Amino acid sequence: MKLWEKDYSINNEIERFTVGRDREMDLYLAKYDVLGSMAHITMLESIDLIGKDELPQLLAALKEIYKEAEDGRFVIEDDIEDVHSQVELMLTRKLGDMGKKIHSGRSRNDQVLVDLKLFTRAKLQEIAEETKSLFDELIKKSNQYKEVLMPGYTHLQVAMPSSFGLWFGAYAESLTDDMLFLQAAYKMTNRNPLGSAAGYGSSFPLNRQMTTDLLGFDSMDYNVVYAQMGRGKMERNVAFAMASIAGTVAKMAFDACMFNSQNFSFVKLPKECTTGSSIMPHKKNPDVFELIRAKCNKIQALPQQIMLIMNNLPCGYFRDLQIIKEAFLPAFEELSDCLQMAAYIINKIEVNEHILDNPIYAPMFSVEEVNRLAQEGMPFRDAYKKVGLNIEHGNFTPNMDIHHTHEGSIGNLCNDKIEALMNQTLDGFNFKRVADAEKKLLG
């Protein structure tokens, strides 16, 4: 069954090609399609396009379908084109012609738009919560090891003193900035396109504010043409936010792999989180961090993939946009998996507290000595030359008792300020508004 079917059949090969992976991808959207339909028919009843006696029956049937989708029992039958057709067919089988009324005043175009927005905002909340979990683990480790020094590097050369407090805390603060991108993506997503129909509105007196409130959107996409133009744009913007998080996690994974190697031995991964070699019995490989790095690098390519599909399309709907779903919808699960794994291993990771016992790291205290001499009155350039020559001639003895006090330094991590920034950004999402609206709609 196709919602657009008339008195002829489409060629089987054309159908195979045009449907593609739609059925598979639409399973991601099933329960959100039902939510959108519940809000839509509630609005239709208010403008007398659905009878007062019909609405309770339709809502009850839709709640049953929602439960099927939530439990993973919802299927799109082989001869059914998409999730919208399947939901309407299930209603029609149960309630007869009443089920055919739910499509009044909308198109599959705005129906899939609202499905995608409802799905995306739910997944963005999950990503935000999992990012916060990783953030919490990093802050905890930063505070735990704030006194443990390690070498900082420039050009992969030993440079200056750093600390595990700084290293863990740096990635925590990076996630704080990433969360700002995520919040912006969420706010752009949380606008209602329902009622834009095929992109040009409807002659029915739709109450778009009503569906906006019922679904917990912050506002609507007001201009109906822009609502349609938002397809692809929303996915691209969200993908950039996901890529920002993925970039932070990929960089952290690279560091962890390098610091775990025998040449560094800065950190030790729990043995149950490593894998072995089929030929070398001593190996404990950081496969989890390597896979996190690869998956996160793949996610960083997602914005470009989406952009290349939608970038040169004029306004209006085109079937090209359907292909975006294949790249976009599964990406949330992949990023979520990476965040969960990263948080788990950061929690278990062990830090080498005796790195500086190795004399190869002595030169990293050279700047400390230059600064000490400068504070005693020696011109900085003269102090720099004196310490440099001492190192060249093997006469440099480092003073490892360092005192950094400025904001964000080894001795003043500002983790409380970083946590406050993260919490302030999280509060700005206002997830409760959405939860309350959906609970009321389903209740």
Image (cartoon, helix red, strand yellow):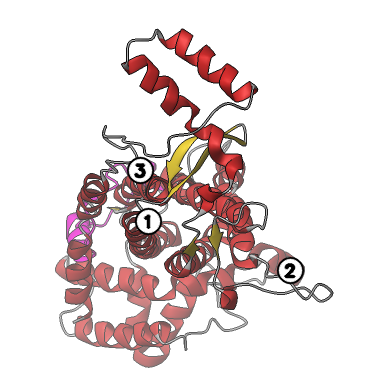
User: Which residue is situated farthest in the front direction here?
Assistant: 395
Label 3 element class: helix
- Mark 1 falls on what kind of element? loop
The reply, left or right, for residue 443 in relation to residue 259 is left
Q: Position of residue 27 (x, y in %)?
A: 50, 75
In front here: 437 or 332?
332
Q: Quadrant of residue 56?
A: bottom left
* Residue 11 circle label: 2
Residue under label 3, please give it. Answer: 177
Q: Which quadrant would the N terminus be assigned to in this image? A: bottom right
Mark found first going from the N terminus, 3 or 2: 2
Residue 313, by quadrant, is: top right
Q: Amino acid at mark 3?
A: Asp
Disc 2, SS? loop
Kindly identify the amino acid type of the residue bearing the numbered disc 1. Tyr
In terms of depth relative to the viewer, which is nearer, 244 or 44?
A: 244
